Image (cartoon, rainbow, N blue to C red):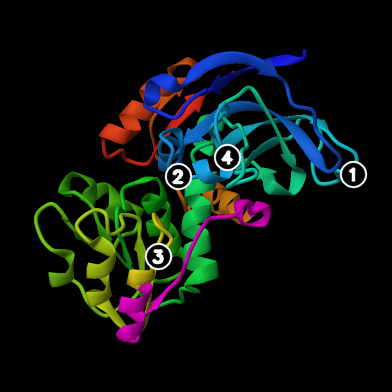
Amino acid sequence: MSTMRAVVQHAFGGPDVLRVREVPRPVPLPTEVLVRVHAAGINPVDWKTRGGGGMAGVLGEPPFTLGWDVSGVVEETGFGVTTLKPGDEVYGMPWFPRAAGGYAEYVTAPARQFARKPASIGHEQAAAVPLAALTAWQALVDTADVRPGQRVLIHAAAGGVGHFAVQFAKHLGAHVTGTASAPRHAWLTALGADELIDYTAVRFEEHTKDIDTVIDLVGDTRDNTSTRSLDVLRPGGLIAAIPAGGSPELLQAAQSRGLRTSPFLVEPDGPALTRIAELIDAGEVSVEVEEVFPLEQAARAHTRGQNDHTRGKLVLRVSS
């Protein structure tokens, strides 16, 4: 079989530029694996890139295939691969921020950018994990070095990254405060949040203080969330402003007040995915998928993600 189905866009634009086409099937190079994709996760960076923002500067001009979150089965291994074999169920976020082509029946990538899929969940749930969970894990563990007893504030706690950040921060022993609309509060409490603030009704800076780390998944483009977050940090506290990576203006404002910022972009990380899979299989972390769409409805899935505040993640079903 030399071709496969993939969602291809030939121009930047709205969801209607996403079309399913027959394209050549990739071949694994040495140290790479060919993965038959069962499901692909959808992330905000996908629709931002589709429209010419996000990682468009990295991918270049269309045509290209979006998608970095995949879960599937190893079909073939290239020379030198020793960690995986055909038949292994794997998940990963290959190549980010370079093109991975996850909205397709097959992808190739270095074997060590994948990890074995959590055994306790199916491919559709597993595909919702990599980019969102790695973003939360790398921000909390590698960047902020969150320790027991510290106070963490998570903006957009009910979203894809946010619901993992709540659970990871709690696993690390932190006191977790999240911002989310009121209908999400009971669910987030069950995930481990200690305090919740309804951002639609009150100003978060009036209801929390002495925060060690802010995981900002909103940014200054929406009601100056990043800049306002500086008001709740303790001296020496850290804000990881993830959507924009931390602007020079935010950095200057933080430094003038004895606070820290960190430019942040998630990276492929097979070992971290292995640890996250262990937490999922141990029942310490749950994965929320709000809706699953067939590959042919990628455009509808993008419209859904852009227009609504989803609870957890959206996923494409690629093959059974």
Mark number displayed over residue 59: 4
- Which quadrant does the N terminus fall into? top right
- Is 59 magenta? The answer is no
Disc 1/disc 2 C-alpha distance (Å): 34 Å
Q: Which amino acid type corresponds to the residue marked 3 in the rendered image?
A: Gly
Disc 1/disc 4 C-alpha distance (Å): 28 Å
Start-end of magenta stretch: 251-274
CA neighbours of label 2 inside 10 A, class few (<14), some (14 to 19), many (20+): some
Residue 318 in sight here: no
Mark number displayed over residue 80: 1
- Is 272 magenta? The answer is yes
Q: Which amino acid type corresponds to the residue marked 4 in the rendered image?
A: Leu
Q: Residue at horizontal 56%, vertical 47%?
A: 281
Numbered disc 3: secondary structure? loop
Mark number displayed over residue 246: 3
Numbered disc 1: secondary structure? loop
Mark number displayed over residue 54: 2
CA neighbours of label 1 inside 10 A, class few (<14), some (14 to 19), many (20+): few
Q: Which residue lies furthest to the right in this view?
A: 79
The quadrant holding residue 69 is top right
